[in-house]
């Protein structure tokens, strides 16, 4: 399978392109499965805005500005942020790939 954005070859079961990071769109027009999670990287406070930006494929700065404006002009934005912080699960830990014995001896 090939990435729709950069044209590089990627595995058939990939959800994201390893080269450009874009979400994969399959031949039938359906995008890869997405989850609303708080990422561990690139967050400022709790990762809520970054999670929404990743989920809806928006710029994270735009989401942060909109959320800030909603919080300043009404208490609902702050309450919604706290609720999302509690409800949204955190992204699973990305564990490093195990090093096989063959690779380990070859590098020494």
Image: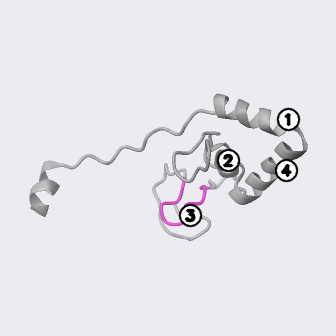
Rendering coords of residue 73 (x, y %): 90, 45
Give the Cα separation between the discs numbered 1 and 4: 11 Å
The answer to whether residue 53 of the structure is visible from this angle is yes
**Do the residues under discs 3 and 2 have CB atoms within 8 angstroms?**
no
- Give the label on residue 76, or none: 1
In the displayed structure image, the side of residue 65 where residue 98 appears, left or right: left
Q: Earlier in the sequence, mark 2 or mark 1?
A: 2
Give the Cα separation between the discs numbered 3 and 1: 40 Å
Image colouring: one colour
The answer to whether residue 59 of the structure is visible from this angle is no
Which region of the structure is painted magenta?
A: 16-24
Q: Earlier in the sequence, mark 4 or mark 3?
A: 3
Depth check, mark 4 against mark 3: the one in front is 4
Q: Quadrant of residue 61?
A: bottom right
Q: According to the image, label 3 marks what residue?
A: 3
Depth check, mark 3 against mark 2: the one in front is 2
Q: Residue at x 47, y 65 (%)?
A: 9
Give the Cα separation between the discs numbered 4 and 3: 36 Å
């Amino acid at each position: 399978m090939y990435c729709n954005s950069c044209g590089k070859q990627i595995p058939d079961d990939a959800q994201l392109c390893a080269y450009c990071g874009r979400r994969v769109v399959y031949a039938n027009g359906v995008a890869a499965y997405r989850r609303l999670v708080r990422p561990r990287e690139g967050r400022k406070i709790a990762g809520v805005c970054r999670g929404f930006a990743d989920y809806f494929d928006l710029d994270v700065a735009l989401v942060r500005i909109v959320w800030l404006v909603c919080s300043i002009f009404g208490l609902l934005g702050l309450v919604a942020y706290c609720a999302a912080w509690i409800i949204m699960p955190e992204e699973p830990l990305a564990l490093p790939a195990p090093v096989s014995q063959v690779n380990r001896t070859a590098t020494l």
